Image (cartoon, grey):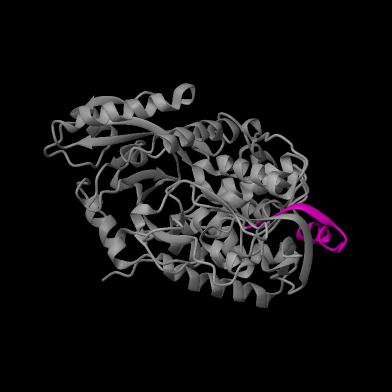
Amino acid sequence: MVDTQREKLIQSLADPKKTWDIIVVGGGATGLGTALDAASRGYKSLLLEQADFAKGTSSRSTKLVHGGVRYLAQGDIGLVREALYERGLLIKNAPHLVKNESFVIPNYKWWTGAFYTVGLTFYDLLAGKLSFGRSKHISKKETLNRLPGVKEKNLYGGVVYHDGQFDDAQLAINLAQTCLEQGGTVLNYFKVTGLLKEDGKIAGVIAQDIESGTIYQIKSKAVINATGVFVDDLLQIDEPHKKPLVRPSQGIHIVVDKSFMPGEDALMIPKTDDGRVLFAVPWHGKLLIGTTDTPINEHSLEPRALEEEIGFVMRNVSKYLTRPPERKDVLSIFAGLRPLAAPQKGSGGTKEISRRHKIIVSASGLITITGGKWTTYRRMAQDTVDKTIEIAKLSPRSCVTTDLPIHGSQKDVDRTDHLYVYGSDREALLDLIKENPEWAEKLHPRMENIKAEVVWAVRHEMARTVEDVLARRLTALFLDAKAASEMAPAVASLMAAQLNQDRDWEESQVAEFDHLTKGYLLKNE
């Protein structure tokens, strides 16, 4: 087991003479992927994240690894082909977290069955050898069997297609662990506050350990800005008054009990009020419904769902379900921001904003990666490191991540056991119970999680706060916010014992998490 102890990782920053090859700023999907790519090529790599890994966008997705059916409709075949290829690599390299999920599009107009079957067959063909299965038209009876809870009136049949589903926050943690195994260094709660320059060129960063307050000057040959919706903050440090590069767009998800649609298949609503697609996807015994696409003018680590977004999701899903969810049924509601790359010229309207990734090199040599999506994180990382080798004049080394298993990688996991997300770590986690039999106890009657998972999160997954554990290690906050709030005191107590913290720390952690949870609960009107 690779060492994840924070104190030991920080020691690698203490030598002022040390020069890293690459410093990556940002611990979301793109930053973690980039740090892993660099470390696996043998470069001395350091990743610094101001909060927790995947704190922002990367833990707030629709949990899909997909080519993007709507991008096909928009004619962006290149993006879809690239994403389908990456989808195939992900299920090969992280089979414990990525699975083949079948989606059903119910047809309420006679002609839509043939229309979607043709379009989705082309989608399958673009995947080539990495296809997840052929699309097909199904009868009205089979549609109702596969989507129990969907409206029968005027239903003609359905179309089944296949895409991927995954656990985003857990994959982020596994990427951090893989990076460490490859010789890289990754640190959360480490905020980059400035850039070091020599003769106007990037020479490293100034960073502060949020926990201790200690400030470090860290030298490197290259700095990569992979901060998602926050890319403009670092660009402003580099070049004050620079025109913003990113226009954030918000997407929300509501989580309800699976009884609203108790089957194993996901529902895909092909056209909503605003022309987007909407999904209702089974996820850890719940039903995840989303998402929206709302341009906003400011970014935040804790975005909040807007009332019009909640209304949009409820209104559109109610057209398809015999028992539509009401506000009182929502177990958790969460919002995420997409870092969409805005064009440098023109109006910057939302229709011009692309999901394709862009790499921008500043005059100082700061390398910024923007846009993209979870599915293509590995390709984004490869392109970014290739560009960094060129800009920083590093000795060229080939990318190896196409065939690199991600930490925990294990085929044929038992998805009826909630511990499957730990993959090959599952047995070691259960071994903790030998150390303390009490750790076999559940944390909450409505949740499957056990106390050993909290200890594991601290010892091996770099969790530092109650929120880290309940939001991004156990995903309880996203599944049932009220239950997560009720779990907080037990989690704080377990963590305090592992981190040598006192009762005051426990109480402040519980209070902070309780305040946070309020944003995930829907007020009944």
Which residue is located at x 59 percent, y 72 percent?
A: 240
Q: Is residue 367 magenta?
A: no
Residue 445 position (above or below residue 403): below
Task: Give the residue at the far left of this rendering.
Answer: 154
Give the residue displayed 66% in from the left and 62% down from the top.
494
Is residue 10 within the magenta segment?
A: yes
Tell me where residue 518 sits by quadrant: bottom left
On-image quarter of the N terminus: top right
Placement of the C terminus among the 4 image quadrants: bottom left
Q: Residue at x 22, y 46 (%)?
A: 321
From the viewer's side, name the closer residue of 437 and 85: 85
| Res. 429 in view | no
Name the spot of residue 114 as percent of width and height, x first: 21, 27
Horizontal side, residue 59 vs residue 462: left or right: left
User: Residue 91: x, y in percent?
Assistant: 53, 33
Which range of residues does the magenta coloring cover? 6-25
Q: Give the percent coordinates (x, y) of residue 356.
A: 46, 46
In the displayed orientation, state which residue is furthest to the bottom. 504
- 134 vs 44: above or below: above
On the rendered structure, is 82 left or right of 398? left
Residue 514 percent location from the top left of the image: 50, 71
Q: Nearer the viewer, residue 16 or 441?
A: 16
Q: Is residue 406 left or right of residue 180?
A: left
